Image (cartoon, rainbow, N blue to C red):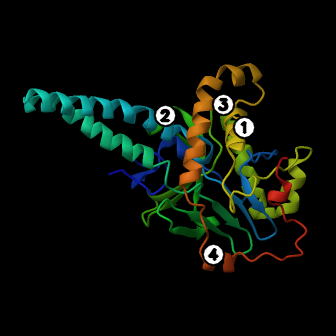
Amino acid sequence: MSTFSAYGMGPGGFMVNRPLNDFERDNHFNIKQPASQQVHYDLSLVKLNSTFVECVDKWYAMRGFVAMAGGVVIPIFGYIIVISIVEAATSGLWWVLLPALLPIFMLWWTFKFFLSDAFTYTHYPIRFNRQNRQVYAFRRDGTVLKAGWDDFYWTIYNTQLGLGGGDLNVMGHLMGKDGVTIKESIGLSLVDAGEPGRRNQLQFFEFFRRYMEEGPGPVLDALKPTPLIMLPGIDRRRESWFFGWELLTGGMKGLPLLQVLFQPFLFPISLFRWVVMRTSKIPQWPQWVEDECLIDPDDMWIRDERHAAR
């Protein structure tokens, strides 16, 4: 039976304890073969060096949206409940509270929805260590998954075959001993749709595959002439409101008219995103992870917040 993992936003996360679907089998990556001749990184990188590359997870770009969905609905249900209580108190007819039972349940569920975004962690980093060929993923409960790069089943997931929507993203599955059942999943940041989106996913996975199999030099050479722009030090400080708004608006890059038309929607999300970031903790890797990911201070390939856009 499928259940939800410790990742993701909303009431659940990624579906696990399930078999691979046909789309995942058809889009399985072979880590020894190039997925694309081009590479793409989707403004998702926190750090890059000769030891590891660290990126954000699937949900980072969406932060604020879930909080807004919950934050807008909470006052509505709260108002219905208060009116019902006042009516019952003034009339003495306590049966009028019965219609408030559903809003009470919905208020609880909406709070849970809101708190899956706010009062959590600012992001959930994933670290690929090419020296020991291990992958580290920061879970929602603050624990860390460690597994071999070679042990993941890397593929493209289509939400149309899961919870609906048709969005595509690269997933890494850890399989059970039977080789069929998915026991744990992590999702990389780029979310796209359609056949052009699938090509983008191939380039996105190729960035990490080429880094792990060939090193930082070859992957950065493949990126040229596109500049490598890092995220602005989100491992040490919370992002600014402006950066969050810029990130949300940048999701429609190349479509300036839509960027303007969607501001009545994007601007409120940016405000909720700011609340999310201010109420959430910055994730800190345990010392044992840092010990396994030591960086040579003279490493010529160090890229971090000093290479962020200004």
Residue 33 can be seen in this image: no
Q: Residue at 68% of width from left, 70% of height from top?
A: 133
List the residue tagged with mark 1. 246
Residue 96 can be seen in this image: yes
179, 100: nearer the viewer: 100
Whether pointer 1 and pointer 4 mark residues with C-beta atoms closer than 8 Å, the reply is no
Tag nearer the camera, 1 or 4 = 1
Q: Tell me the number on the disc at residue 195.
A: 3
Within-10-Å neighbours for mark 2: few <14, some 14–19, many 20+:
few
What amino acid type should be assigned to the residue bearing mark 4? Val
Q: In 3D space, how far apart are the residues under numbered discs 3 and 2 (Cα atoms)?
A: 14 Å
Does dot 1 land on a helix, a strand or a loop? Answer: helix
What amino acid type should be assigned to the residue bearing mark 2? Gln
Q: Is residue 288 left or right of residue 163?
A: right
What amino acid type should be assigned to the residue bearing mark 3? Glu
Q: Quadrant of residue 178?
A: bottom left
Tag nearer the camera, 3 or 4 = 4
Counting from the top left corner in percent of width and height, residue 192 is at 63, 36
Tag nearer the camera, 1 or 3 = 1
Tag nearer the camera, 2 or 4 = 4
The earlier-in-sequence mark between 3 and 4 is 3
Q: Quadrant of residue 200?
A: top right
The earlier-in-sequence mark between 1 and 4 is 1
Q: In 3D space, how far apart are the residues under numbered discs 3 and 4 (Cα atoms)?
A: 37 Å
229, 217: nearer the viewer: 229
Q: Residue at 13% of width from left, 28% of height from top?
A: 90
List the residue tagged with mark 2. 160
The earlier-in-sequence mark between 2 and 1 is 2
